[in-house]
Image: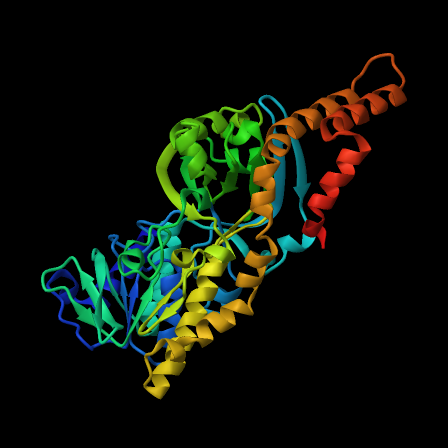
C-alpha cells in the first residue's frame, strides 16, 4: 500500500467516524450492531452486516485497525474474496512453497512442497500480509459498505438489561453505547468476554506464546529472491520444529517472505515458557541463530517486534458462542488450528465473523435479540470447516505432548544421523551405509514394533 493510499484511507475513516470519534460519543441506538475489535473476525462481521443493509459500529482500541494485531504471516482468503474485491488488497506475496523442517541442534532435515498450481491464481488462496496494512484496508472496505469505525477506544465491559446484553462501556467520558447486538471480536486476550462471564479464562496449558520480528535487508534489494529462490510475487512459508527450533518447549518456528521483508518467529507452549523459563526473546534468538536459519537472515535488521498469545484448546475449549444480545467470534472463541501441519486462524476468524454477521442480520429482520434467534451462527460454524477441522485434530496436541521427547528431540537427531550415514562418502559399499542408516532410525523408534506402534498412533493424520 502506498503512502497516498494510506493517507486516502485515513481520510476516509476520519470522514466516516467524524469528529465524534474524538469526543464523548453519544451513539445510543444509532447503530444496529456494536462490534468490539476491528481485526479480521470483527471486520468480516461488519462487512457482512453492512452488505446486508445494517449499520454496524466497529470499535478498535488501536490508532488504526491492525495496529494491535499480530499473527504469523499467511492470510487465507476464500471467504474474504467472496465478501469484497481483493484486487486492491495489500497482499505481500502468494505462497508458492511450503517447507517443513526438523531441526536438531546443528542439523536440518526438510521436505519442500511446490505444486505448480500454486503459481496460478487464486494461488491456493494463501498470501503473506502485514496486519497493519491489511486490517486497515479490510476495515476500509467495511466502511465503504456502510460501517462506522471508531479508533483509539477501548471497550471495558458490556451493558446488561433484563439479563441480556444491550451495549458496551468504553473508556471515553460517558462512553456507554447501546445497540441491539454486540459482537465480541476482541482476540485471544478477551478481557471483556471474561469480565462479563461469557467465557472462562483459558488454562495456560491451552495457550501458546508467540514472538515475531519483521526483518529488512538494508543494502541488499534481492536478498529475499536470492535466498528463497523466488521470482516475481512468489513467496514461501517455512515451518520448523524440533529442539533446534524452540529448545525444550512444545512448539515451532517459522519464516514467511513479505514483499521486501521477512517475518520470522516462534510459537510455543505458555506452560513451557513458565516452567522451563524460556523467554520469547531468548527462544526467538536461539531459533534465528540455528545454522539452517541464520544464513537466510544474514545482514537483516529488525524493523518490528511483536508478541501475542494463541488459543490452542481446540473445539473442547470453545465457549458458548451466543448469548442474549451477543456473540463471540475469532480468537476470542478459540478458533485457531495450530498443530504444526496446519497453521490456520485467519480463515477461521473471517468465517466466524461472516456467520455471526449473517445470523444477526436474520435475527434483526425478525426483530429478535435472544440467544435462540442467533443459534444459526454456531449451527453454521459447527457444519463448516472451522469446527470440523478443530474436531479432526482434537486428539493430536495431547498425543504429540505425550511423545514430545521422541518427536522433538530423539527423532530429529536420528533422521539427521541417518541422512549423514546414508550419503556418507568413503570406500564402504552403499548397502553398508543404508543398513546403518535404517538401524539408527529403528533403534530410536524401538525397531519394527516401535515403528508400527508410532504409525498406528498417528494414522488419523492420513485418514
| Vertical relation: 53 (above or below) 216 | below
> Which residue shows up at 50% across the image and 68% down it?
381
Whether residue 88 is visible:
yes
Q: Position of residue 421 (x, y in %)?
A: 77, 20
Q: Nearer the viewer, residue 229 or 159?
A: 159
Q: Quadrant of residue 17?
A: bottom left
Q: Position of residue 265 (x, y in %)?
A: 46, 37
- The color scheme shown is rainbow
| Vertical relation: 21 (above or below) 228 | below
62 with respect to 342 (left or right): left
> Which residue shows up at 60% across the image and 40% down it?
400
Q: Position of residue 180 (x, y in %)?
A: 27, 77
Q: Residue furthest top?
A: 427
222 with respect to 138 (left or right): right
Q: Quadrant of the C terminus?
A: bottom right
Whether residue 1 is visible:
no
Q: Position of residue 318 (x, y in %)?
A: 45, 59
432 with respect to 61 (left or right): right
| Vertical relation: 416 (above or below) 152 | above
Q: Quadrant of residue 185?
A: bottom left
Q: Nearer the viewer, residue 387 or 402?
A: 402
| Vertical relation: 186 (above or below) 141 | above
> Which residue shows up at 71% across the image and 22% down it?
417
Amino acid at each position: 500500500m502506498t503512502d497516498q493510499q494510506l493517507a486516502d484511507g485515513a481520510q476516509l475513516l476520519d470522514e466516516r467516524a467524524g469528529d465524534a470519534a474524538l469526543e464523548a460519543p453519544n451513539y445510543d441506538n444509532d447503530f444496529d450492531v456494536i462490534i468490539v475489535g476491528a481485526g479480521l473476525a470483527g471486520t468480516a462481521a461488519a462487512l457482512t452486516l453492512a452488505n446486508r443493509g445494517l449499520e454496524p459500529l466497529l470499535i478498535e482500541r488501536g490508532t488504526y485497525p491492525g495496529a494491535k494485531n499480530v499473527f504469523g504471516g499467511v492470510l487465507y482468503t476464500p471467504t474474504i474474496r467472496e465478501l469484497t474485491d481483493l484486487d486492491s488488497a495489500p497482499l505481500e506475496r502468494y505462497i508458492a512453497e511450503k517447507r517443513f523442517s526438523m531441526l536438531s541442534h546443528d542439523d536440518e532435515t526438510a521436505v519442500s512442497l511446490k505444486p505448480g498450481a500454486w503459481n496460478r491464481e487464486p494461488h491456493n488462496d494463501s498470501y503473506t500480509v502485514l496486519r497493519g496494512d491489511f486490517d486497515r484496508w479490510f476495515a476500509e472496505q467495511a466502511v465503504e459498505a456502510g460501517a462506522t469505525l471508531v479508533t483509539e477506544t477501548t471497550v471495558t465491559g458490556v451493558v446488561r438489561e433484563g439479563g441480556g446484553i444491550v451495549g458496551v462501556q468504553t473508556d471515553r467520558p460517558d462512553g456507554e453505547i447501546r445497540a441491539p447486538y454486540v459482537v465480541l471480536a476482541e482476540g485471544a486476550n478477551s478481557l471483556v468476554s471474561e469480565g462479563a462471564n461469557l467465557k472462562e479464562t483459558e488454562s495456560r496449558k491451552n495457550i501458546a506464546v508467540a514472538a515475531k520480528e519483521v526483518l529488512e535487508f538494508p543494502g541488499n534489494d534481492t536478498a529475499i529472491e536470492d535466498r528463497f529462490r523466488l521470482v516475481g510475487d512468489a513467496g514461501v512459508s517455512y515451518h520448523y520444529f524440533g529442539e533446534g527450533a524452540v529448545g525444550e518447549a512444545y512448539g515451532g518456528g517459522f519464516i514467511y517472505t513479505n514483499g521486501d521483508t521477512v517475518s520470522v518467529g516462534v510459537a510455543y507452549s505458555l506452560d513451557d515458557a513458565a516452567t522451563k523459563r524460556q523467554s520469547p526473546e531468548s527462544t526467538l534468538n536461539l531459533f534465528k541463530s540455528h545454522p539452517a536459519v541464520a544464513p537466510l537472515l544474514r545482514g537483516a535488521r529488525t524493523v518490528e517486534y511483536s508478541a501475542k498469545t494463541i488459543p490452542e484448546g481446540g473445539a473442547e475449549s470453545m465457549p458458548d458462542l451466543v448469548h442474549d444480545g451477543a456473540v463471540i467470534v475469532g480468537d476470542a472463541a478459540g478458533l485457531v488450528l495450530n498443530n504444526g501441519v496446519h497453521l490456520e486462524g485467519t480463515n477461521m476468524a473471517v468465517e466466524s465473523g461472516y456467520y455471526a454477521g449473517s445470523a444477526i442480520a436474520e435475527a434483526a429482520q425478525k426483530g429478535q435479540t435472544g440467544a435462540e434467534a442467533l443459534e444459526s451462527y454456531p449451527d453454521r460454524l459447527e457444519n463448516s470447516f472451522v469446527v470440523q477441522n478443530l474436531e479432526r485434530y482434537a486428539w493430536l496436541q495431547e498425543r504429540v505432548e505425550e511423545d514430545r521427547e521422541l518427536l522433538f528431540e530423539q527423532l530429529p537427531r536420528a533422521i539427521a544421523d541417518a541422512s549423514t550415514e546414508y550419503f556418507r562418502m568413503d570406500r564402504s559399499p552403499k548397502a553398508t551405509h543404508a543398513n546403518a542408516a535404517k538401524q539408527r532410525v529403528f533403534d530410536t523408534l524401538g525397531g519394527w514394533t516401535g515403528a508400527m506402534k508410532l504409525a498406528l498412533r498417528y494414522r488419523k493424520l492420513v485418514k
